Amino acid sequence: IDFTYADLSVRLVTQDTHRFLRRETYNYKDCYVVESLPRDERYPYSKRVIWIWKDRELPIKVEHYDREAKLHKTLFHHYWTEVQGVWFPRHSLLKDHERKHMTILFVNTVQYNTGLHDTIFVPASLGNMR
């Protein structure tokens, strides 16, 4: 599988420094293209370039660059749906440019606020689940 925790996790705005690059139409959507540089040097990517769907303020494409500033992965989000006030992509495709491989993630059903404790979703706990 090509997805890592860093690829799927939501980063706080304060975790990166951001620079507006341009407005662009991508996949028939008006987007803001933003470059995000991590403040923490331990973050696995040197930068991300994000296409943010202007009407919904959602990321529809994310380019991840490795420590040598080479394009490493591109994440595409499609078919955004709102459930219980939360938007999520039903289809996500991640291309790993270095390994020349891709993984597609399909989400059929989503439930929010089901009573699960937040501590089971930290990286250390996720690695132990089987």
Image: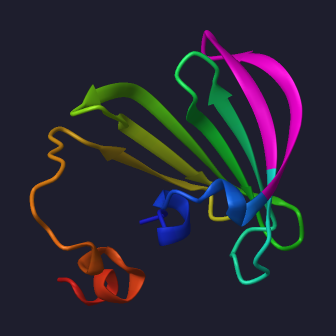
Q: Position of residue 31 (x, y in %)?
A: 70, 21
Left or right side of 90 for 25? right
First to last magenta residue range: 17-35
* Residue 16: quarter of image: bottom right
Q: Position of residue 80 (x, y in %)?
A: 38, 27
Who is closer to the viewer here, 33 or 2? 33
Number of numbered markers = 0
Q: Position of residue 76 (x, y in %)?
A: 54, 38
In this rendering, is residue 32 above or below 20?
above
Give the vertical position of 116 relative to 91 (above or below): below
Q: Residue at x 54, y 61 (%)?
A: 7
Q: Residue at x 28, y 80 (%)?
A: 119
Name the residue furthest top: 28
Q: Is residue 37 left or right of residue 105?
A: right
Residue at the location (47% across, 63% down)?
3
Q: Nearer the viewer, residue 38 or 48?
A: 38
Quarter holding the C terminus is bottom left
| Farthest-out residue, left | 114
Residue 80 in the figure: left or right of residue 77: left
Q: Is residue 102 magenta?
A: no
